[in-house]
Image (cartoon, rainbow, N blue to C red):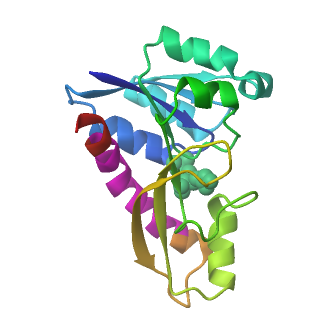
Amino acid sequence: MKNIAIFASGEGSNAEAIVRYFTDSDKVRVKCVLTNRQNVGVHSRMENLGIQSLYFPKEAWTDGNQIVEILKQENIDFIVLAGFLAKIELPIIQAYSNRILNIHPSLLPRYGGKGMWGHHIHKAVIANRETESGITIHFIDENIDSGSILFQAKCEVSPDDTPDTLATRIHALEHKHYPQVIEQLLTK
Ligand code: GAR
């Protein structure tokens, strides 16, 4: 059994899709969710699913060592970022080298880097009249959105899209593919 920890900062729809996908798995188990935000949707989603969501303040994420301690205590093998909007510091990257996956709501390397997250990306994609966007699942390294890419999927962008309609299409792609990519990686 591989134990995963999900890091999330917001609504937690990807975290929920992943938890549901692995509910009956005998190979992969979501052990806990770690967050850097209080009062966000991911806490109630996890409560409903019976998964513990643990909040840590900014200092703990900036230091990193306390987070590594918790991950070790929980016997975590692999980390999955799902809408996690803080930097992953070196102690965590070193402790989980090549074992941290992120999902990004654009076709990296386009629309990646500092300030490019969530709706900011969808707004920029629409403003630039792109005809396609998509999702990227990639490993984490010390820089933002630059680790090696494992998987991408595309969707159309239509001229009458708004950031909300595009976000809905992107979320559907994420919920479909992210759990499957995690499964393939952890059970091969
Ligand atoms: C997702 O679309 C995810 O790709 C994005 O935030 C959203 C979180 O939704 N992540 C980033 O932009 C990271 N750079 P969720 O909280 O409902 O899973």
From the top left corner, tell me how far across and down residue 155 is, in percent.
Answer: 42, 76
From the viewer's perspective, tell me whether residue 64 is left or right of residue 174: right
From the top left corner, tell me how far across and down residue 184 is, in percent.
Answer: 26, 44
Q: Residue at x 65, y 67 (%)?
A: 121
Q: Nearer the viewer, residue 39 or 82?
A: 82
Quadrant of the rendered structure where residue 42 is? top right
Quadrant of the rendered structure where residue 53 is? top right
Q: Nearer the viewer, residue 169 or 155?
A: 155
Q: Nearer the viewer, residue 104 or 44?
A: 104
Is residue 7 depicted above or below 116 in this figure? above
Count every numbered label the image shows and give the total.
0
Residue placed furthest toward the right: 59
From the viewer's perspective, tell me whether residue 106 is left or right of residue 3: right
From the top left corner, tell me how far across and down residue 24 is, in percent.
Answer: 20, 30
From the top left corner, tell me how far across and down residue 71 is, in percent.
Answer: 52, 17
Name the chief secondary structure element in magenta.
helix
Q: Name the quarter where the C terminus is drawn.
A: top left
Q: Is residue 38 visible from the viewing direction of this image? A: no
Is 122 part of what is drawn in magenta? no
Q: Residue at x 31, y 42 (%)?
A: 185
Is residue 155 depicted above or below 186 in this figure? below
Q: Residue at x 23, y 27 (%)?
A: 27
Q: Is residue 112 visible from the viewing direction of this image? A: yes
In magenta, the rendered stretch is 167-183
Q: Name the quarter where the N terminus is drawn.
A: top left
